[in-house]
């Protein structure tokens, strides 16, 4: 990877003092002295940040007269902040974790830290001291959750205190060193109006999705990584009537549904002895026993797709899920493939029929090369002549003057009839309003 020439990351202001080799050695020395103090005075030092900082200030005051040249005020503040971040925070990436417009932090060994900021990957000038420093960082983060990363378990998933998701993998699975991927999840929730204002979709499409969700239409949101699938799912969950009970099923809890009655279920990996695994399929089947009005599967990626389809087909109308796929057609073929991977005994034809009976809408989202994210298609899935037909209802049309750095265009409805109007009417909603949203628009 090469560093972008158009985008650069500004190092946090606290780093105005240069983190030279001399300062790194001093930081290591003080860090070790603090660890010794914990052994002598008790682990309660680590549990009390104020007491810990007081002890650190004492150590700095004790060593400053012995240094030549003396520490400047900026260097002293830098060392203090870095050591506190090492012991109680996120180490070198602490400031990145505080930036709300960073969606991913990617650590490629100790010397490279990249961020996804405003949809663009950019290399920062931050780094860990060495591979041991990075491994100690991971051990501290994972140890709190009872997880470990070693030769027996060389890759791991974990959730950080702020809800962000961490994935780490180490040699021999990756020869360049420990690789860490952190997907950020912010407490601030986007609203439907904000998505419209950002151009993610237009108001007519949002009204269409609102009516579809409220009326119990089963929806799959598809797209590539970081395309906005989970963001859209969180927003449209707010259209589910507040009187209904939702059970969510996820591998790692990421959803922040805008609804008052949500029961979150999270799968569990095997422990160090190889026992205790709880799969997504287990959780989907369990959700059927929990009096759920709707089941939301954060992402289907395995044989649990069959359990999800059966749940959608036995009374859990209005269920939602996301899937990695590049087009609505790929959604159908991928669901078929995942379902056939299990030992269910169903034929391909039976699975195709089950998909058509369970899924009514496919919402395709995409991240463009300029970093923008949009819905590019909303399609209806219908069954005709023993085959599944995808009927596109809304699409995104590109402008003719697009450049490499700027993508613009217009969301339009295609004016095609839909069989969903009858289902909406059966739920007590006005089918005319539904059909009005699908009226074709002028391209001018």
Image (cartoon, helix red, strand yellow):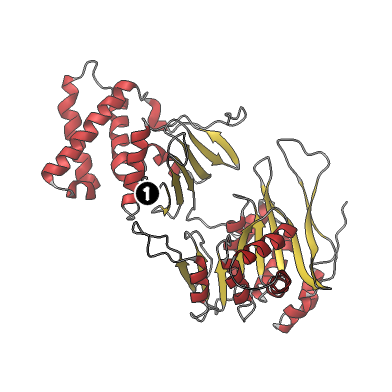
| Identity of the residue drawn at 29% across and 31% down | 79
Task: Please determine whether, in this image, residue 277 is positioned above or below residue 150.
Answer: below
Task: Please determine whether, in this image, residue 235 is positioned above or below residue 144.
Answer: below
Lateral position of residue 133 relative to residue 217, left or right: left
Lateral position of residue 432 relative to residue 362, left or right: right
Kindly indicate the quadrant of the structure image that contains residue 38: top left
| Identity of the residue drawn at 37% across and 49% down | 152
Task: Please determine whether, in this image, residue 137 is positioned above or below residue 216.
Answer: above
Q: Is residue 29 or residue 385 the one in the foreground?
A: 385
Q: Residues within 10 Å of mark 1 (few under 14, many from 20)?
A: few
Kindly indicate the quadrant of the structure image that contains residue 436: bottom right
**Where, quadrant-wise, is the N terminus in this rendering?**
top right
Of all residues shown, which one is farthest toward the top? 69
| Identity of the residue drawn at 42% across and 64% down | 277
Kindly indicate the quadrant of the structure image that contains residue 117: top right
Q: Which residue is mark 1?
A: 152
On the image, the x and y values in percent for residue 58 come to 16, 34
On the image, the x and y values in percent for residue 440 come to 86, 62
Lateral position of residue 264 relative to residue 316, left or right: left
On the image, the x and y values in percent for residue 110 come to 41, 33
User: Count of labels shown?
Assistant: 1
Disc 1 on helix, strand or loop? loop
On the image, the x and y values in percent for residue 101 come to 53, 44
Lateral position of residue 137 relative to residue 359, left or right: left
Q: Is residue 244 visible?
A: yes
Q: Is residue 236 visible?
A: no
Of all residues shown, which one is farthest toward the left? 40
Q: Is residue 302 or residue 160 the one in the foreground?
A: 302
């Amino acid at each position: 990877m090469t560093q972008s020439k158009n985008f650069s990351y500004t190092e946090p202001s606290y780093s105005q003092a240069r983190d030279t080799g001399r300062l790194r050695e001093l930081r290591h020395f003080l860090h070790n002295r603090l660890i010794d103090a914990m052994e002598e005075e008790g682990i309660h030092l680590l549990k009390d940040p104020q007491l810990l900082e007081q002890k650190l200030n004492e150590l700095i005051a004790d060593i400053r007269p012995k240094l030549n040249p003396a520490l400047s005020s900026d260097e002293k503040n830098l060392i203090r902040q870095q050591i506190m971040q090492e012991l109680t925070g996120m180490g070198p990436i602490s400031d990145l974790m505080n930036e709300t417009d960073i969606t991913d932090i990617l650590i490629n060994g100790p010397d490279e830290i990249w961020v996804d900021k405003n949809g663009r990957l950019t290399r920062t000038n931050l780094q860990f001291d060495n591979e041991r420093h990075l491994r100690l960082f991971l051990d501290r983060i994972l140890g709190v959750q009872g997880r470990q990363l070693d030769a027996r378990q060389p890759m791991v998933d974990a959730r950080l205190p702020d809800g962000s998701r961490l994935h780490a993998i180490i040699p021999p699975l990756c020869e360049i060193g420990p690789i860490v991927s952190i997907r950020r999840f912010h407490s601030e929730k986007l609203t439907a109006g904000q998505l419209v204002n950002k151009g993610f979709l237009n108001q007519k499409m949002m009204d269409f999705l609102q009516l579809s969700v409220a009326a119990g239409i089963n929806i799959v949101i598809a797209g590539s990584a970081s395309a906005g699938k989970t963001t859209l799912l969180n927003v449209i969950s707010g259209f589910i009537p507040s009187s209904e009970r939702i059970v969510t099923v996820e591998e790692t809890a990421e959803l922040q549904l805008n609804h008052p009655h949500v029961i979150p279920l999270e799968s569990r990996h095997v422990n160090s002895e190889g026992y205790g695994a709880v799969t997504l399929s287990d959780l989907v089947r369990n959700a059927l026993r929990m009096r759920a009005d709707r089941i939301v599967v954060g992402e289907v990626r395995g044989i649990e797709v069959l359990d999800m389809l059966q749940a959608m087909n036995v009374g859990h109308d209005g269920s939602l899920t996301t899937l990695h796929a590049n087009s609505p057609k790929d959604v159908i073929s991928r669901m078929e493939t995942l379902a056939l991977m299990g030992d269910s005994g169903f034929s391909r034809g039976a699975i195709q029929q089950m998909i058509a009976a369970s899924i009514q809408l496919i919402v395709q989202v995409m991240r463009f090369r300029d970093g923008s994210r949009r819905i590019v298609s909303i399609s209806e899935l219908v069954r005709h002549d023993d085959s599944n037909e995808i009927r596109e209802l809304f699409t995104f049309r590109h402008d003719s003057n697009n450049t490499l750095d700027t993508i613009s265009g217009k969301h339009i409805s295609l004016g095609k009839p839909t069989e969903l109007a009858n289902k909406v009417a059966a739920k007590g909603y006005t089918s005319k309003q539904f059909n009005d949203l699908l009226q074709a628009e002028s391209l001018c």
